[in-house]
Image (spheres, rainbow, N blue to C red):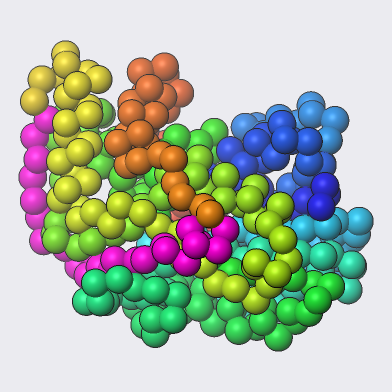
């Protein structure tokens, strides 16, 4: 299991995961359309292959996947807001292209296929603990397509083609290809840059996962025995905090790290985003022994350090930090 291909390997999580796997001794192929560039990848590493490719180009993907042991499928038009874009873009990348990729990987002799679904497939739930067998109640096309791909994967599960689905929480923290359109990252950016946090709603519960824990989980899935993960779906989300509680954490940490900014104001406005759910991640702890090592507070501190070090210039206006803005600017289709 030394040869790994990451679709979307130049994205937010991929930009941290790729160097991590290289440092761990893996041969890594990044297959990415490069909407956000690849300058943040360690392209001089002898064990890294970078391919600019579209997941809808199955012929190109079929060539790229030859000799690969494991595919980590992270590529997608990411997050609910991305559906402000042409719906067809998201449907073709997130859904239509999925099963042909799985088939191509299996035909090429890939031994393991890891699919990054999303905990947002649960929509709104009053259940105190949303486990993996909770009904999928998608609110947007993004989480609808994420959920619809899961049974397509199971069609191809076999002893020599081990398939596993992860439903991660919202990822947070600093990555080389930074996103600032995710809840913890948004609130931290506003606190540091504007000295004020806008909270939309506040009561909605959102599970979060530190980006380093996300990367550690993907690395674990390269090593886990077949019998532990074959045909399995795992939640991966921790600290099911309300948006208001996250905002209070951000306020406290930013005031501590940047005392010169004084008190950070906190303003509440109505929200049109009702998604609220409390996911339970006991299964992945029980079966794989996976528990997070980082917190939302760690993510905020990491972002504050990046701001302090000048790594996030033009954080309110730079389009590369914001998926929807970037794709609109590219007129992606």
Above-or-below relation of 129 to 286: below
* Nearer the observer, 58 or 224: 224
Q: Say if the magenta span includes residue 268.
A: yes
Q: Is residue 230 left or right of residue 165?
A: right
* The magenta segment: 264-288
Residue in the image at 73% along x and 66% along y: 226
| Residue 312: x %, y % from top left | 42, 27
Q: In which quarter of the image is the C terminus?
A: bottom right
Answer with the quarter of the image where residue 191 lies: top left
Above-or-below relation of 60 to 148: above
Residue in the image at 41% along x and 24% along y: 306
Q: Can residue 133 be seen in the rendering of this structure?
A: yes
Question: Could you tell me how many numbered marks the image carries?
Answer: 0
Q: Is residue 32 left or right of residue 237?
A: right
Q: In this view, does 161 lie to the left or right of 278?
A: right
Q: Can residue 319 be seen in the rendering of this structure?
A: no
Answer with the quarter of the image where residue 40 lies: top right
Q: Residue furthest top?
A: 260
Q: Say if the magenta span includes residue 112.
A: no
Residue in the image at 81% along x and 52% along y: 1
Residue in the image at 10% along x and 20% along y: 262
Above-or-below relation of 276 to 332: below
| Residue 221: x %, y % from top left | 65, 56
Q: In this view, does 311 lie to the left or right of 202?
A: right
| Residue 323: x %, y % from top left | 46, 52
* Nearer the observer, 62 or 247: 247
* Nearer the observer, 106 or 283: 283
| Residue 284: x %, y % from top left | 50, 62
Above-or-below relation of 259 to 184: above
* Nearer the observer, 218 or 85: 218
């Amino acid at each position: 299991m030394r040869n790994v291909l990451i679709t979307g390997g130049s994205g937010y999580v991929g930009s941290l995961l790729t160097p991590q796997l290289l440092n761990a001794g893996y041969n890594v192929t990044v297959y990415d359309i490069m909407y956000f560039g690849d300058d943040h990848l360690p392209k001089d590493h002898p064990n890294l292959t970078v391919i600019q490719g579209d997941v809808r180009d199955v012929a190109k993907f079929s060539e790229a996947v030859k000799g690969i042991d494991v595919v980590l499928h992270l590529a997608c038009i990411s997050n609910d807001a991305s559906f402000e874009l042409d719906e067809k873009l998201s449907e073709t990348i997130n859904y239509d292209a999925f099963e042909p990729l799985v088939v191509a990987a299996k035909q090429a002799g890939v031994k393991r296929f890891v699919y990054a679904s999303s905990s947002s497939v649960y929509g709104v739930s009053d259940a105190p603990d949303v486990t993996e067998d909770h009904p999928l109640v998608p609110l947007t096309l993004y989480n609808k397509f994420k959920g619809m791909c899961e049974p397509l994967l199971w069609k191809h599960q076999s002893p020599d083609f081990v398939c596993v689905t992860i439903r991660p929480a919202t990822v947070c923290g600093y990555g080389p290809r930074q996103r600032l359109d995710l809840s913890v990252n948004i609130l931290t950016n506003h606190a540091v840059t504007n000295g004020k946090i806008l909270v939309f709603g506040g009561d909605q519960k959102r599970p979060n996962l530190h980006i380093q824990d996300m990367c550690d989980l993907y690395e674990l899935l390269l090593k886990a025995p077949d019998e532990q993960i074959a045909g399995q779906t795992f939640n991966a989300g921790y600290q099911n905090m309300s948006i208001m509680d996250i905002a209070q954490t951000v306020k406290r940490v930013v005031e501590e790290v940047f005392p010169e900014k004084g008190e950070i104001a906190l303003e509440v406005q109505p929200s049109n985003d009702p998604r609220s759910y409390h996911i339970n991640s006991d299964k992945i702890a029980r079966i794989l022994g996976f528990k997070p090592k980082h917190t939302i507070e760690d993510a905020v501190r990491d972002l504050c350090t990046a701001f302090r070090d000048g790594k996030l210039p033009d954080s309110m206006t730079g389009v590369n930090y914001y998926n929807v803005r970037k794709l609109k600017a590219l007129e992606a289709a």
